[in-house]
Amino acid sequence: MKNQHHAVRVLCALGLMLLAAITVQAKEGTTMGIEVSPYGTTKDGIAVNQYALTNQNGLRAVLIEFGAIMVSFETPDRDGKMANINLGCPDLAGYEEDSPYFGSVVGRCANRIAKGKFTLDGTEYTLATNNDANHLHGGVVGFNKVVWRSEGFTTANGVGVKFTYLSKDMEEGYPGNLTVVMKYTLSNDNTLSYDYKAITDKATVVNLSQHSYWNLGGHSAGTILDHELMINAANCTLTDETLIPTGEITPVAGTPLDFTKATAIGARIDQVEGGYDLNFVLNDTSTKLHHAATVSDPKSGRVMEVHTTEPGIQFYSGNFLDGSFEGMDGIIYPQHSGFCLETQHYPDSINQPQWPSVILRPGETYRHYTVHTFTAK
């Protein structure tokens, strides 16, 4: 057994050396490339690597194997000044212990499941209730709290990382052995894409999302209340006081939830108890890539467009950031210092059979594709 472990370590080391060589070749005459380096060690003693992806225009994404987390994302403003626009923790311990899902992949089921219970094919399953009385983002040890296998790759137009994780049968209470592959790709057209696939050996529930907190002014720029947001959704899913959908889909017109035209996030936020934390039903609910949202920052000029194959998007305005959390670079993040746009199926869909299904069965493949496009004006 020791010899087998030694062989695996040697192969991993050779793989990293080969990737480094690819990085050097890719960077000759251009800025595009991949850099791999140690990020830290988990409390259980597992070494975690980081990948720094850079495209030909200098955009840079840093990703780690823990939680398949994007720890930072650097883009230029209208004057070409680079800044990290992704909120994050100062180190690995922060992501293990304190993080409110900063930059992570969340699953097996993103968002909330009422009372942590669902019935599938006649069997009732009980999950952790880690959000008051409800289940949130996969449970106590969701996909944001595990170490993923990783592999860097290059394409004709960019660079990326493929993360793979096997979620075993009954992990966090979910049935079936679920194999998940998630690819981040940073392309030279200044797009960042998330490409998810999953297969299972038993009927299960799958709803994956990416939980970055964005601040287009820079992660140290204060609040996002002056950011202008447009969500391509005429309806939303109503929720009860615990943020579980009632099953009713209602128009947003004439309410503080109406972002069908670009509106400052802070313009009506005081009319929404607690701030925004709601799923919007996108106008196009097909599985083809469609426009979901556009956000712009008047101060920096940065613009982010979101396209997705998912039917919904959760808009969260960083309500629970209370000014006590110290993020990267020693920055204290105040309330509303970041926003999330989580492309996904609707919350608690497993208990709402009239909504798009989150059930995955053997022989099927779960697919989810989301693209962020970055510009400055």
Image (cartoon, helix red, strand yellow):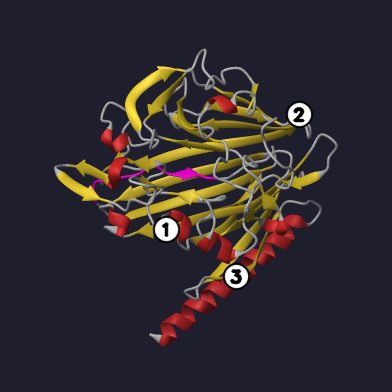
Q: Which is more foreground, mark 2 or mark 3?
A: 2
Q: Residue at x 50, y 30 (%)?
A: 273
**Label 2 crowd bin: few (<14), some (14–19), many (20+), radius 10 Å:** some
Amino acid found under the numbered disc labelled 2 = Pro
> Residue 359: x percent and y percent?
29, 40
Q: Is residue 9 visible?
A: yes
Judging from the image, what secondary structure is the residue with disc 1 in? strand
Whole-percent x, y for residue 337 in the image: 65, 42
Q: Gap between marks 1 and 3, in whole Å?
A: 19 Å
Q: Image height check: is 359 above or below 262? A: below
Pick the residue in front: 275 or 345: 275
Q: Position of residue 206 (x, y in %)?
A: 35, 44
Q: Is 74 left, or right, of 111 in this rendering?
A: right
- Residue named by callout 2: 298
Identify the mark at residue 40; answer none if there is no mark.
Answer: 3
Q: Earlier in the sequence, mark 2 or mark 3?
A: 3
Q: Is residue 268 magenta?
A: no
CA separation in Å, label 2 and label 3: 37 Å
Provide the residue span drawn in magenta: 202-211
